[in-house]
Amino acid sequence: MSVELHEETGGKILILNLSGKLTKEDYANFTPEVERAVKDHGKIRILVRMHGFHGWTLGAVWEDMKFDLHHFAHIERLALVGDKRWEAGMAVFCQPFTTAKVRYFDESQGEEAVVWIHEGIAQAAQTT
């Protein structure tokens, strides 16, 4: 599994690139970064790019559920970019665990996902 995480807008937006099969250990690597961003900003946005993504191991599914329940109210937008075959499953899987606005984008719509995840950030930063 390959997991790359980087932040934009001072950590308000996290970009997560996934390929292969997500494991429990992968969660252990990126969860502290998410928790730091939540501590710094309260609410964050996450853009997940799935390229060559093959799902989760059983241990990772459990970690995902714990992560989602713990961060239920901390994620305001979640953009999922990947192969169209993941759309229905990801949308159904994510929705019960979050109050976030969740949108799925096909790989060909990557730029649209970036625009959507950044939408309103500049205005919000100017008013605070």
Image: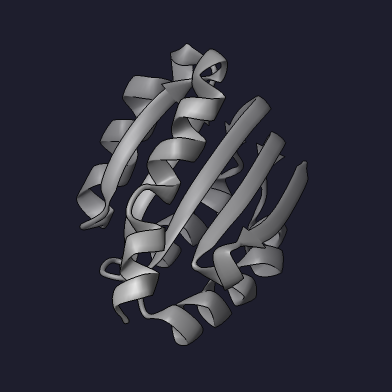
Image quarter hosting the N terminus: top right
- Toward the bottom, the furthest residue is 39
The x and y percentages for residue 94 are 32, 44
- In the image, residue 31 above or below residue 108: below
Left or right of residue 6, residue 69 in this image: left
Q: Based on the displayed image, in which of its 4 quarters is residue 123 positioned? A: bottom left
Q: Position of residue 20 (x, y in %)?
A: 73, 32
Q: Would residue 98 be found to the left or right of residue 109 on screen?
A: left
19 left or right of 77? right
The quarter of the rendered structure image containing the C terminus is: bottom left
Relative image position of residue 112 (x, y in whole percent) = 45, 27
Q: 53 or 82, which is in the foreground? A: 82
Front residue of 109/25: it is: 109
Q: Is residue 82 left or right of residue 68?
A: right
In the rendered image, residue 105, in percent from the top left (x then y), is placed at 43, 24
Q: Residue at x 67, y 42 (%)?
A: 17
Q: Is residue 18 above or below residue 85?
A: below
Of residues 125 and 57, the one drawn nearer to the viewer in this rendering: 125
* Residue at the (36%, 72%) spot, across then down: 126
Residue 3 visible in the current orientation = yes
Query: What residue is at 59 percent from the left and 35 percent from the top?
Result: 49
Front position in the image: 17 or 113: 113
Colour mapping used in the image: one colour
Residue farthest along the right direction in this orientation: 2
